[in-house]
Amino acid sequence: MRSKLSVRRKSHKDHLDLEKARTGIDGFDEITGGGLPKGRPTLICGGPGCGKTLFASEFLVRGATEFDEPGVFVSFEETENELTKNVASLGFDLAKLQSQRKIILEHVYIERSEITETGEYDLEGLFVRLGHAIDSIGAKRVVLDTIEVLFASLGDDGILRAEIRRLFRFLKEKGVTALITAERGEGNLTRYGIEEYVSDCVISLDHRVHEQLTTRRLRVIKYRGSSHGTNEYPFLIRSKGFSVMPVTTMGLQATASEIRVSSGISQLDEMLEGKGYFSGSTIMVTGPTGCGKSSFASHFLESVCSHGKRSIYFSFEESAAQIVRNMKSIGIDLSTWEKKGLLKFDATRPSYYGLEMHLAQSIKLIEEFKPSAVVIDPLTDLTSIGSANEVKLMLSRLIDYLKNKGITAVITGLRSATDVSTDDDSTGISSLIDTWVCLNWVHSAGERNRTISIVKSRGMDHSNQVREFLLTKTGSQLVDIYLGTAGVLTGSMRVSQEAKDLAEAHARSQEVAHLTAQLEAKRKFYTAQASALDAELKAAEAELLKALSQSKLKEERAKLDRIDMAASRKKKNSKNYPKVQNASRNGSEHGL
Amino acid sequence: MKKNSKSIRNAKSRISKTDFTKWHLKLYIAGKTGRSQTALRNLESICEEYLKGIYKLEVIDLIKHPKLAKGDQIFAIPTLIKKVPRPVRKIIGDLSDIEKVLVGLDLKSIEAV
């Protein structure tokens, strides 16, 4: 923590103390926090062919054209014509700049065989020429390429060392920002130990071959009074000049977007809360060969382009033409987007250059094209040119970079076909990935069928379902796979099982209808019978009641008859009769 | 020293054979420094001794004429250039080693030294 703070304080101080001269060289000013130390000499050393002269030329040309700082190029090796031709390859027109008096080329020709040394001398002649050149155009920048020629051509080391020391002092007095190139020596930075005279800033260029692949690298060895990136940075010499990649300076400052982007496959969007990926997130799709990774990626690109956004397709396996043709088979026409300038293909063999260079090149392209989405297909091919750890580092830097830029990335990864059961990721970057989609094969009934599932998707409630991934002429489709009593089925097994299920369901529903009808019939039958019996009962009841009342009437009549009869017999027990008579009358009334 | 005077005599005898050749010498200096003065003195004495009457000496002060440095590819001071007769020769230093100067000017072969 403390060291971080002190670094920050130091860099803050830089702005106050050390003035810097911007080089205009892509990426270099970022590493050094503003360029080379202004008004001081800088040494740039490296082996043959590593780009020292080009670096120096670009420093001078950009100074003259972009920062209004005229420059003097003192060449000890190449003539004016040779130099002009060499830098013309970078698109710099030295002849024009010379005629505009923005740059002076000064070729110092020293041929040992033509020179005899007698007694003491100094390099005042060189100083005079340099001074004159600087004064005549008001130069602010000077390049000496390469001063070591003096050592090879002249015999007196003692004089030379003293004079070189004086030369650097002279340059400082002139207030010019000087760049001195020197050849790398064995065990030393430079062959003749020039570095001991340049104390302000030393840059080393390197050109390394690793497993038959070359990567150019740049390192700031020393920068007095300034903090600087200490890593080795890969650089490119491109058609537009030098390009240094400060890729190892990135931190974790990516912002998190709430915006969602479609995956290009509507059913997949449904699996991702119905909205798709987060914008700016990194999506990895892994699967064995031929399971539709590129198709998956192409769907995404088409969706991005159809929203009028730009995208880049980095291909490490197929050429642009191949991809366009192949994707037509699933109804995606990428060429239209390419023609509209929304899609850019970048197809390179992984072995074309080293990992660092791939990273550098990709970032360069992204910086130029400014896409909102990229596809890297497939990333596993990169493992052929670096160890797993190197690839992981490179990818994490690339992913960090993309996240910082808010670029949505779909990365495809090949998984070993023999090991289809696990969700392994051969490159070990799954922890850097936001959404991980796993494509797979299912073998059954003599078929291979593709399945798709989401292993993870950070920050959203994603589906846990495995779906079948169909590639059709009109695009990809996700279909629910069969999950039922017969197990997990895909393809025609799924289709036939679904048909069977349908038939069974049909049969079952018919049976239910039949039974319901039967029940209804029975109910009707018994209801009818019940009402008939009820009617019968009522009839019988009426009959019986009628019979009952008749018999009661008869009884009544009989009693009356008996009374009448008794009355007529002039009664013996006359007192009892009226009682009986009353009671019976009452009872009959109740009964009726 | 004895050997030295002998070889100078040899050189004298050779020059006498090429009497009519014109010698054109240029001495580049930068200001009137001690070293340039030494060089000029040394050169004048050599010329007077070996090339009397057949040489032309031009002294160019680069402080006054910095533009002239480029044409003859001057980087060291003092520099003596023999333009004529051909081939062009360049001798740097204060010319204190007369033997070397004579060789450099083709007034004397290397074997003789």
Image (cartoon, rainbow, N blue to C red):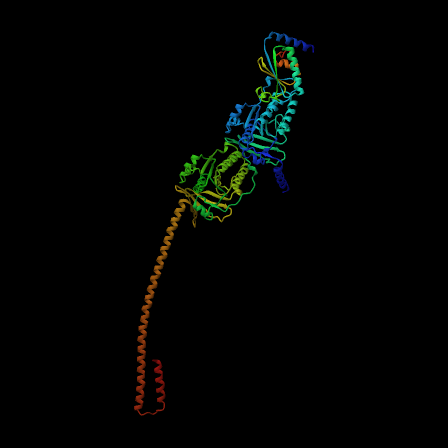
**Up-down relation of residue A322 to residue B71 (above or below):** below
Q: Is residue A435 visible?
A: yes
Q: Assign the C terminus of chain A to one quadrant of the image.
A: bottom left
**Front position in the image: A438 or A533:** A438
Rendered residue at 53%/25% (across/down): A83
Q: Nearer the viewer, residue A37 or A86?
A: A37
A556 sits left or right of B54 in the view: left
Query: Residue at position x 38%, y 49% from top?
Result: A500
Q: Work out which residue is located at the far right of the displayed protein and give it.
A: B1
- At which x and y percent is residue A369? 48, 37
The x and y percentages for residue A418 are 48, 39
Residue A424, image x, y percentages: 51, 42
Q: Is residue A468 left or right of residue B74?
A: left
A2 vs A88, nearest the viewer: A88
Q: In the image, is residue A529 above or below residue A472?
A: below
For the N terminus of chain A, give its image quadrant. Answer: top right
Residue A380 appears in the picture as rendered: no
- In the displayed structure, does residue A558 sit left or right of residue A168? left
Does B29 sit above or below residue A354?
A: above
Can you name the residue that lies furthest to the front here?
B64
Give percent across and percent down for residue A113: 59, 17
Q: Which quarter of the figure has residue A9?
A: top right
Image quadrant where residue A143 sits: top right
Along the line of sight, which residue is nearer the eye, A16 or A294? A16
Please give the count of numbered marks on the rendered protein: 0
